Amino acid sequence: MVAVGKHARAISASVVLAFDENVATLVVADDGIGFDPERAVGFGRGQLRSRATQVGGQAEISSRTGGGTTVRVTIPLVALLRPLVPSDQGRAEPRAVQGSSTSSAGGGRAVMLRLLLVDDHPVVRAGLRGMLAGEPDLEVVGEAADGEEAVRISAELKPDVVLMDLRMPGIDGAEATRRIAALDPAPAVLVLTT
């Protein structure tokens, strides 16, 4: 939000993250000075669109001088659960999530995602565990209180997804994520921080 205040000179901004059955949508809007999209250079717009397209999503930026800016990024949920791994062409490509299969009510196979919760605050971990407990396709397989423990448990339990806090004593979430990404198989890492 620093960029919104510094560059857009906005008084207010909103960030909305919504999920539906197939996609995650992030919308960031501000009431700042805006810009003319036809004349603007930079602002990372090309990189944002490229990254969204790389995982099958799209990014739209709408703005007008004096009228604020809205950025809308839509990503298929399956892309959020596939870590990017280098391909032999040098660009990152999605890797399938392992997930254990379970029978669904309709007779097909559903994917049960195995989660590792990483946060140095026990109350936060307990809250996340409680929120996720009712989800039929998610299983919390472990918890870690710091980055070093997160790496060790990830190697042992091989979760599909690690919910990672960034600010922790010792090895922080960024370094733990780097080390977890080097595991084989490497779980997806979703950063949750305040």
Image (cartoon, rainbow, N blue to C red):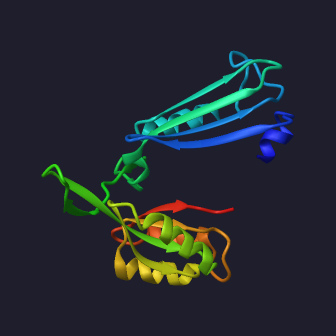
Look at the picture and state if 47 lies above or below 180. Answer: above
Relative side of 128 to 86, left or right? right
Quadrant of the image occupied by residue 101: bottom left
Which residue is at a point 54% across and 33% down the rendered structure image? 49
Query: Measured from the top left, where is residue 140 in percent x and y?
Result: 40, 72
Quadrant of the image occupied by residue 14: top right
Decide which of 92, 65 is in the foreground and name it.
Answer: 65
The quadrant of the image that shows the C terminus is bottom right
Query: Measured from the top left, where is residue 47 in percent x and y?
Result: 58, 37
Decide which of 51, 108 is in the foreground and name it.
Answer: 108
Which residue is at a point 44% across and 72% down the rendered structure image? 116
Query: Measured from the top left, where is residue 193 in percent x and y?
Result: 64, 63
Relative side of 11 to 58, left or right? right
Look at the picture and state if 56 lies above or below 173. Answer: above
Query: Measured from the top left, where is residue 107 in percent x and y?
Result: 12, 52
Look at the picture and state if 153 lies above or below 115. Answer: below
Relative side of 85 to 60, left or right? left
How many labels, in total?
Answer: 0
Which residue is at a point 53% across and 42% down the rendered structure image? 18
Quadrant of the image occupied by residue 137: bottom left
Decide which of 51, 2 is in the foreground and name it.
Answer: 2
Which residue is at a point 34% across and 71% down the rendered structure image? 184
Furthest residue toward top: 38
